[in-house]
Amino acid sequence: MLITGILITIVAIFMILIPQFFMSLKNPRIPDKLLKKPKMKIILRVWGSIFVIVGIILIVFSIT
């Protein structure tokens, strides 16, 4: 559970810092119309922050 928490936290931090990389992934395919909207970056950053919290909770539970 510790390793999973660390991996989730690392990926989530990258999701917050560089959302353009995750927007350019081919699977799942996101229509170009949605990719051009600035709200998409905000949505990815919100999801990233949620996953950072989940990753930290996993790390804390595995340590205690």
Image (tube, rainbow, N blue to C red):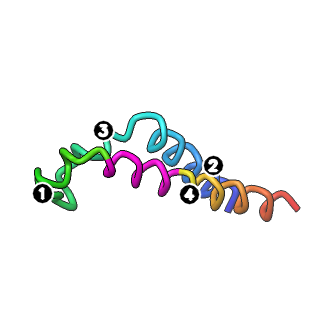
Of the two numbered discs 4 and 2 in the rendering, the one whose residue sits closer to the viewer: 4
> Reading the chain from its start, which is encountered first: label 1 or label 3?
3
> Reading the chain from its start, which is encountered first: label 1 or label 2?
2
Which quadrant of the figure has residue 34?
A: bottom left
Q: Amino acid at mark 3?
A: Phe
Q: CA distance from mark 1 to mark 2?
A: 31 Å
Q: CA distance from mark 1 to mark 4?
A: 24 Å
Quick check: marks 4 and 2 in contact, CB under 8 Å?
Answer: no
Residue at image coords 56%, 52%: 49
Could you say which disc has been placed on residue 43 in the image? none
Write down the residue under mark 1. Answer: 31
Q: Is residue 35 above or below residue 57?
A: above
Residue at image coords 23%, 48%: 37
Q: Amino acid at mark 2?
A: Ile
Q: Position of residue 61 (x, y in %)?
A: 79, 64
Q: Is residue 23 above or below residue 2?
A: above
Find numbered disc 4 in the image and state the secondary structure of the residue it sits on: helix
Q: CA distance from mark 4 to mark 2?
A: 11 Å
- Residues rendered magenta in the picture: 39-48
Could you say which disc has been placed on residue 21 in the image? 3
> Reading the chain from its start, which is encountered first: label 4 or label 2?
2
Q: Is residue 17 left or right of residue 52?
A: left
Write down the residue under mark 2. Answer: 6
Residue at image coords 47%, 39%: 14
Q: Is residue 44 a member of the stretch shown in magenta?
A: yes
Find numbered disc 3 in the image and state the secondary structure of the residue it sits on: helix
> Reading the chain from its start, which is encountered first: label 1 or label 4?
1
